[in-house]
Amino acid sequence: MVHKATNPRLCIFAPQSSLVPRRIVTTENKNLKNKYRFVLLNDETFEEKFSLILTRTNALLFAGILAFTLIFLTAVAIIYTPLKYFIPGFGDYNYRSEIIRLQSEADSLESHLEARELWLNNLLMVLSDSIKPARHTSKPPPAEIDISKIDLLETNAADKDLRKEIEAEESFSLSIVPPLGNPAVEEIKLMHLLPPVQGYITEEFNSSREHLGIDIAVKQGEPVKATCDGSVVNATYSVTEGYVIALQHKNNLLSVYKHNARLLKKTGDAVKAGDVIGFAGNTGETSTGPHLHFELWHEGRALNPRDYILF
C-alpha cells in the first residue's frame, strides 16, 4: 500500500552560487569610474580635432595638482622676489633703520630751513630800512668807584640765593665729559638722560668693529625704561636683533633698544622718561644671553652712551 502524506513539506534548494556574498558596488563609486569623452569638432565639417577620455577621479586629481602648483608658485614668488615688501607688516629691518635715519635728517633739514627763512626775513627788513634805529640818549657818566673800599668777602642775600641755585643744578648734572664745542652735543649732555636698565656692561661701544652701542647684561624679563621723553618711531621684530624699539627725542636724538623679550609700546605712542617700554630678553640670532643692546644716535651719527649717561 502507498500512503499519501497528509502534511507534505515544501523544500526549496537555492543554487550554490547564490549563497556566496557579493561585493556591493554603490552608485557613487560607479559615478566616479564612469568615463566621459571630451571632443573638439569642426562646426562646419564635424571633423574631430581633439578628444580626451576623462573620469571624475582624474578630473579631481588634475584640479588638485593645478591648485597645488599655483600655491607653490605664489609662495616662491613672495619669498624670492621683492613682492614680499609690498605685503603690509612685512619688511627688512635695514630698510626701517634707513627710514628712521632719513626721517631724522628731514627733521634736521626742516629746522635749518626755518632758521634760513628767519635770516632772510631779517636781511630783507634791513635792506628795506624797515628796522627803526635805536635812539641813543645821553646819560651822565657813572660815578667813579673807589676799588679800595670794596669788600670782596661781603655778600648780600641775592648772591647767596644765586650760589645755592647754581650748586643745586650742578649736583643733578649728569654730564661727565667736557664740552666739545658742538652746541647740539652740549644740549644733549644737558638733557638728563636716564639709564634704561641696571646691570653690568659686557661690551663697550666700538665703532671700528661696528658695535655702535653698549651691551648691558641683565636678568630675563628686566623692565626696560625710556631714557628720556619722546615718541616711539619704530617697534618691530627682526630675525637678527629680536624685538627692537626706537624712541625719537628732542635735539634730533634717537635711542634704540634691542633684543627685548616683549614690547609694551607701539609706533606713535608718546613716552615719558622712566616709562617701561618693554622687558629685556634674549631674542634675535645675534644675542648670546639675556641682555639689552642700547644705542644713541644724533643726526645719523652713533654716540657712545657712556659719554652721556652714568651707568
Image (spheres, rainbow, N blue to C red):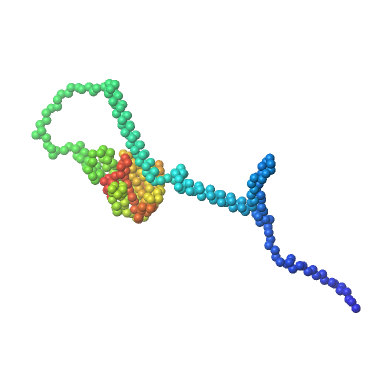
Task: Examine the rendering and report whether any part of residue 205 can be seen.
Answer: no
- Furthest toward the top, the residue is 129
In terms of image quadrants, where is residue 183? top left
Query: Is residue 236 toward the left or the right of residue 164 in the image?
Result: right
- Furthest toward the bottom, the residue is 1
**Residue at image point 38% right, 45% down:** 94
Query: Is residue 21 toward the left or the right of residue 222 in the image?
Result: right
Above or below for 275 versus 123: below
Q: Position of residue 198 (x, y in %)?
A: 31, 52
**Of 49 and 213, which appears nearest the observer?**
49
**Of 46 and 166, which appears nearest the observer?**
46
- Furthest toward the right, the residue is 1
**Residue at image point 40% right, 50% down:** 239
**Residue at image point 74% right, 66% down:** 18
**Of 169 and 49, which appears nearest the observer?**
49
Q: Position of residue 302 (x, y in %)?
A: 30, 44
Above or below for 106 versus 66: above
In terms of image quadrants, where is residue 116? top left
**Residue at image point 36% right, 39% down:** 102
* Image quadrant where one finds the N terminus: bottom right
Q: Position of residue 238 (x, y in %)?
A: 40, 49
In terms of image quadrants, where is residue 125? top left
